[in-house]
C-alpha cells in the first residue's frame, strides 16, 4: 500500500511539472498536424507557418472588440521579448475582420510595441483550427505540430506558464 501511495505521489509530481496548473490550457494527448497554414501580415503578404519550423510558435487569435483579448495582449507583448525564451515566434492574428487602422489603434491604446499585426486569410483559420472563441492561442512545437492550446485569456507572464513553455523552446 505504501508503494502505491508513493508511486501515485511521484507520478502526480512528474505530471504537474509537464502541465501548468492553469485551467484553460488544454494539452493534446497526440500532437496535431495541419497542412499549408497561412495567414497575412499587415501588408497582405502571405505568411507560411512551415517557414517557422524549428521555432516554438504561438498563434494568438484576437479581435479589437474582445475584452479578454485586451487583458492578455500586454502580457503576450512582454512574452515576445522575454530573455528566457529565445526561440519563440508569436503571431497575433486578428480574426475579427477589423481593418489595419482599427487594429493599429488597438495596439497603440494597449502600448503594444514588440508584436506585429497579422490577419486571417480568406480560408479562415478559425474554421481550419476549429476555434470555439477568442482569445485562443494555439501552441506549435518545433516540428510545427499543435501540442496545446489556451482557450480564453491568460497572463503570459505567469511564472508557472513560463517554466512550462520553456520546456518547448
Image (tube, rainbow, N blue to C red):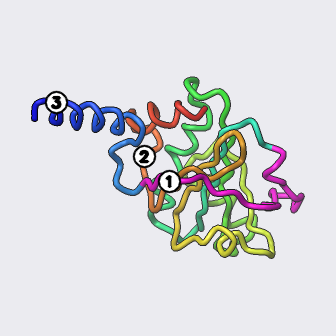
Q: CA distance from mark 3 to mark 1?
A: 27 Å
Viewer-side label of 2, 3: 3
Q: Is residue 29 visible?
A: yes
Q: Which residues are magenta?
A: 25-51
Q: Residue at x 10, y 30 (%)?
A: 2
- Pick the residue in front: 135 or 103: 135
Query: Quick check: 82 above or below 122?
Result: above
Query: Quick check: 147 above or below 69?
Result: above
Q: Residue at x 74, y 67 (%)?
A: 120
Viewer-side label of 1, 2: 1
Image quarter in which the N terminus is found: top left
Q: CA distance from mark 2 to mark 3?
A: 38 Å
In the displayed structure, does residue 159 sit left or right of residue 5?
A: right
x then y, percent, for residue 132: 52, 73
x then y, percent, for residue 48: 84, 54
Q: Which residue is mark 3?
A: 3
Q: Which residue is mark 1?
A: 29
- Check the image and name the residue furthest to the left: 1
Query: Quick check: 73 above or below 168?
Result: below
In the displayed structure, does residue 24 sit left or right of residue 134?
A: left
Q: Give whichever of discs 3 and 1 has the lower sequence position.
A: 3
Q: Using a 10 Å C-alpha cutoff, classify the residue at mark 2 as few (fewer than 14 neighbours), some (14 to 19) or many (20 or more).
A: some
Image quarter in which the C terminus is found: top right
Query: Quick check: 57 above or below 61?
Result: above
* Quadrant in the rendering for residue 83: top right
Q: Residue at x 82, y 61 (%)?
A: 36
Q: Residue at x 43, y 53 (%)?
A: 25
Q: Using a 10 Å C-alpha cutoff, classify the residue at mark 1 as few (fewer than 14 neighbours), some (14 to 19) or many (20 or more).
A: few
Amino acid at each position: 500500500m505504501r508503494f502505491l501511495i508513493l508511486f501515485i505521489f511521484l507520478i502526480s509530481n512528474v505530471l504537474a511539472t509537464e502541465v501548468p496548473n492553469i485551467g484553460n490550457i488544454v494539452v493534446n494527448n497526440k500532437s496535431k498536424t495541419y497542412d499549408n497554414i497561412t495567414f497575412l501580415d499587415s501588408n497582405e503578404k502571405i505568411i507560411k507557418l512551415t517557414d517557422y519550423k524549428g521555432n516554438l510558435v504561438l498563434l494568438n487569435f484576437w479581435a479589437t472588440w474582445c475584452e479578454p483579448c485586451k487583458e492578455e495582449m500586454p502580457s503576450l507583448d512582454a512574452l515576445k521579448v522575454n530573455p528566457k525564451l529565445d526561440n519563440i515566434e508569436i503571431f497575433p492574428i486578428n480574426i475579427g475582420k477589423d481593418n489595419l487602422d482599427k487594429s493599429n489603434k488597438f495596439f497603440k491604446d494597449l502600448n503594444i510595441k514588440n508584436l506585429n499585426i497579422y490577419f486571417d486569410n480568406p480560408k479562415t483559420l478559425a474554421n481550419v483550427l476549429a476555434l470555439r472563441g477568442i482569445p485562443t492561442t494555439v501552441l506549435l512545437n518545433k516540428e510545427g505540430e499543435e501540442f496545446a492550446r489556451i482557450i480564453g485569456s491568460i497572463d503570459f507572464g505567469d511564472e508557472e506558464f513560463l517554466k512550462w513553455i520553456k520546456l518547448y523552446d
